[in-house]
Image: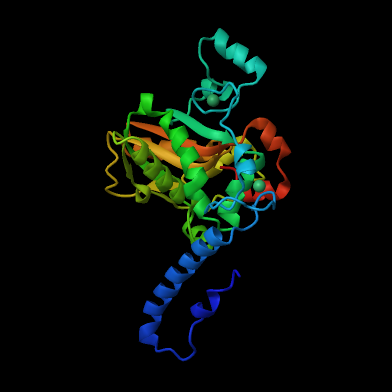
Amino acid sequence: MRCVFSEYLEVEPGIAASQRSGVTRWLRLLTALRDDLTTTVFPDDCHLCAGSLTSWSKTPVCDACLGRVSPQQDSLCLVCGEALGMESARFAVALGADACTACRLAAPEFARAVAFGRYEDELRELLHQLKYSHMQRLAVEPLGRWLAEAIATLAPQAGRDVAVIAVPLYSARERARGFNQSVLLANAAIRHLRKTDRTWKLQSAHDALRRTRDTEAQFSLQPRARRSNMRGAFAVAQGAGLRGREVLLVDDIMTTGATARECARVLRRAGAANVWVATVARAQPETAILMEPGDVARWGGS
Ligand SMILES: [Zn+2]
Ligand SMILES: [Zn+2]
């Protein structure tokens, strides 16, 4: 059943070169249409639990799996969003500041980082599906919607007129993957927010920041070494026009915060008034311990 449209999408041998690019465009369009139709008309199995999908949805994940993802409930550092352990929470309250030890010792250059959920279980699987199984539609629903919820919590401090910049991938890595998941997530969240509230003035400015070095293979480094390895890995484009702007940096996952700190540093240096950070997921310390080696390798220590 699933292949019912495929025979119409085969390239005819010997087709003229001048016609090829137009044909390729049409083939891409038809393939996308076919994927949408087959998923909607002939629902797939859930990509997470392999159970049958009974609802008529473009999201290839069942309601039960989606229902197990919830916003973070922990007591969090009000700066970087790390879960405060019992002791750390008591210490923070005693000092009258809900910030973790790391933020008190060396305040990051970003004003605040928020994340929708913990990087674990179903949420981790959904992000893997997006990045490594090329399930780009997950960026729109549900991941982009959840990211929008996290961004909305920043509005009282950051306002609603912000330049949105996705953390860039190194160019070779983006070419290999075919897309930057953070750009897809940021754009989806912008659309969700504009739909829910017209007072949002979010301008995507992804080209303002670029990654000048591939730092993804730094998973074996300790947090301090990761931070110094990140130094100089990002650059702000000439004429980015960020002076005096509130900037929202978007990424899929925040782990050690080294990426966010370095991006914030260069964005502030380029004149950004404040840098705010929003991610779909936050790896909390207990989560990091539970991570598998392969996961850490792909995770890349951002
Ligand atoms: Zn499921
Ligand atoms: Zn903190």
Q: Taking the image as drawn, is residue 105 in sight?
A: yes
Residue 27: x and y in percent read 45, 74
Question: Looking at the figure, which quarter contains the N terminus?
Answer: bottom right
- Horizontal relation, residue 191 to residue 4: left or right: left
Near-viewer residue (23 or 250): 23
Compare residues 10 and 82 and report the one nearer the observer. Answer: 10
Marker count (numbered): 0
Depicted 159 relative to depicted 206: above or below: above
Which residue is found at the position 51% from the left and 14% from the top? Answer: 97
Taking the image as shown, residue 149 lies to the left or right of residue 18, namely: right
The residue most toward the top is 94
Residue 218 seen anywhere in this rendered image of the structure: no
Q: Residue at x 39, y 89 (%)?
A: 16
Q: Is residue 72 above or below residue 229?
A: above
Q: Residue 195, located in which quarter of the rendered image? A: top left
- Picture quadrant where residue 66 is located: top right
- The answer to whether residue 6 is left or right of residue 245 is right
113 to 49, vertically: above or below: above
Question: What is the basis of the colouring in this image?
Answer: rainbow
Residue 170: where, in percent of width, then height?
49, 55
Give how far across and how far down residue 101 sits, in percent: 58, 21
Task: Name the residue: 46% across, 58% down.
Answer: 171
Residue at x 54% of width, y 75% of height = 6
Where's residue 34, x and y in %?
50, 67
Question: Quarter of the picture for ligand 2?
Answer: top right
Image quadrant for the C terminus?
top right
Between 10 and 231, which is closer to the camera in this rendering? 10
